[in-house]
Image (cartoon, rainbow, N blue to C red):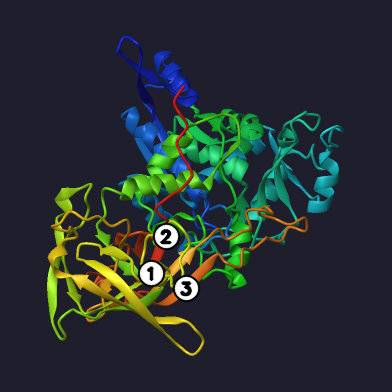
Amino acid sequence: MAEVTNNTNSEEVVSRNFIEMEIDKDLAEGVYDHVMTRFPPEPNGYLHIGHAKSILLNYGLAKQYGGKFNLRFDDTNPTKEKNEFVESIKADVEWLGADFEDRLFYASNYFDKMYENAVKLIKKGKAYVSDLTAEEMREYRGTLTEPGKEDPARNRSVEENLQLFEDMKNGKFEDGEKTLRAKIDMNSSNINMRDPVIYRVAHMTHHNTGDKWCIYPMYDFAHPIEDAEEGITHSICTLEFEDHRPLYNWVVEECEYPHPPRQIEFAKLYLTNVVTGKRYIKKLVEDGVVDGWDDPRLVSIAALRRRGFTPESIQKFVELCGVSKANSSVDYAMLEYCIREDLKSKRPRAMGILNPVKLVIDNYPEGESEVLEADNNLENPELGKRNLTFSKELYIEADDFMEEPPKKYFRLFPGNEVRLMHAYFVTCTGCEKDENGNVTVVHCTYDPATKGGNAPDGRKVKGTIHWVDAQTAITAEVRLYENLVDEEKGVYNEDGSMNLNPNSLTVLKNCKLEASLKDAKAYESFQFVRNGFFCVDSKDSQPGKPVFNRIVSLKSSFTLPAKQ
């Protein structure tokens, strides 16, 4: 994660973020002799772009220090967790390039150990069984300005607490009837330390342990134990857990782990004008506003992959965002910049007409056709060349012709000559219209001497347009995307509902694409000349009938800020 820069003496200077400096200090002082990190998602939804930052940060640190990286599912809440989410998370982490090899773990694998630790705390007088309801618990907890009140059961005997906790485990109580609380300090200025609940009764079938348990640990109790059991050295998490750190430390100390992990917090990644909250995305899915957690208008990792983003573009984006202690927002345009930069020299060009109108070359020989050659990518000669068929009838973009053009319009209009990309000079002679005045056919003549796009007499044209051969073109569906929410009004209304953008998805059914795209496979991407970068949709494409998602347009106003 470190960044290498050059100083005035041309010596390499390594700029390190604050987490790296803390790890360096721990290693130098002998606190740890190795580095082990983890990414611990709860399998209650799909991962989004913010999770990508955490994945790549934790994996990158482990790799940088020659350590190990764990993927661990924090599956302590069976009410919201599904195997569907487990599998999607594994696929996302692998796709991003974070290799967890045989280091896949589940919090539920430690349920026995967590129970033992809870019993240990009871025996030490550090935990007790409470009879308070959830509402009473909130009342007793106090506020930010008022201390909490002691639970009436706080001074139960060790023996009674042990028996009640065992009865909880054995299913003798209903959901919510009893909880196990840590015995810490009801007067603490940190509300998280006011005797937090560490176990609750929940008669639920767990995706991993089935019906073995009817009590489940709370996250703040389970998480530090999972880290300690796996030998995690640095528990890297986001800033909302900063106030939970004293409880994290209390748990590993009171449970007497000899080499406790250290929690370090960093700022979350916030993107402007996108929806990342799981409950909001869930509602969008349930209401049919989007076609699933992987709808290309979302910024879940699965959605970004389906839309055509690459792991390298996400890695670059995370790198540009950096690691900070202060929360801030990043413009979505920076993510688009990263995918443009990644694709522009990697992917082949192709010609696609999104809003077609027919172009007829009146003086081209009837019934004949020819094969022309085109570079796949001028920036990358290694991508080679491809063949294009050319004949009397072509398709061009409807807005590449105007009967009465404004000034500085250099495309087709009566009497004007333009270059057909990779082909010939053509001169517009007129057009045909339907009964509503819509242009249906544009007519032109071509100059056979200009094959390849250059005139032997040296004359120049100001306009170059793309085209596809009508004889061999395939008809395809193309989807264009805008932000899912209204940028001008903000993401959410005052009542919590979302400002949905009615133009977030435009479906074009009659696009004409060059024949080479007919057999394009899912996730394959191309630069459609003048129209942007497009990817074959992985969900709705069929053999021989690809559906294309526009990943991003070709141009943006975003530029990288200059380095200081």
* Label 3 residue SS: strand
Q: Mark 2 is on which residue type? A: Tyr
Q: Residue 26's spot in the image, x, y percent?
A: 45, 19
Q: Mark 1 is on which residue type? A: Phe
Q: Is residue 291 left or right of residue 360?
A: right
- Which residue is nearer to you in this view: 19 or 477? 477
Q: Residue 5's spot in the image, x, y percent?
A: 36, 21
Q: Name the residue beneath numbered marker 1.
A: 413
- Which residue is nearer to you in this view: 495 or 451? 451
Q: Name the residue beneath numbered marker 2.
A: 409
- Which residue is nearer to you in this view: 181 or 547? 547
Q: Mark 3 is on which residue type? A: Val
Q: Residue 260's spot in the image, x, y percent?
A: 50, 28
Q: Name the residue beneath numbered marker 3.
A: 507
Q: Residue at x 35, y 63 (%)?
A: 535
Crowdedness near tag 3: few (<14), some (14–19) or many (≥20) residues, C-alpha within 10 Å: few
Q: Residue at x 46, y 70 (%)?
A: 404
**Compared to 66, does 201 lie above or below?**
below
Task: Name the residue furthest bottom.
Answer: 435
Query: For the residues marked 3 and 1, what is the alpha-carbon distance in whole angstroms?
Result: 28 Å
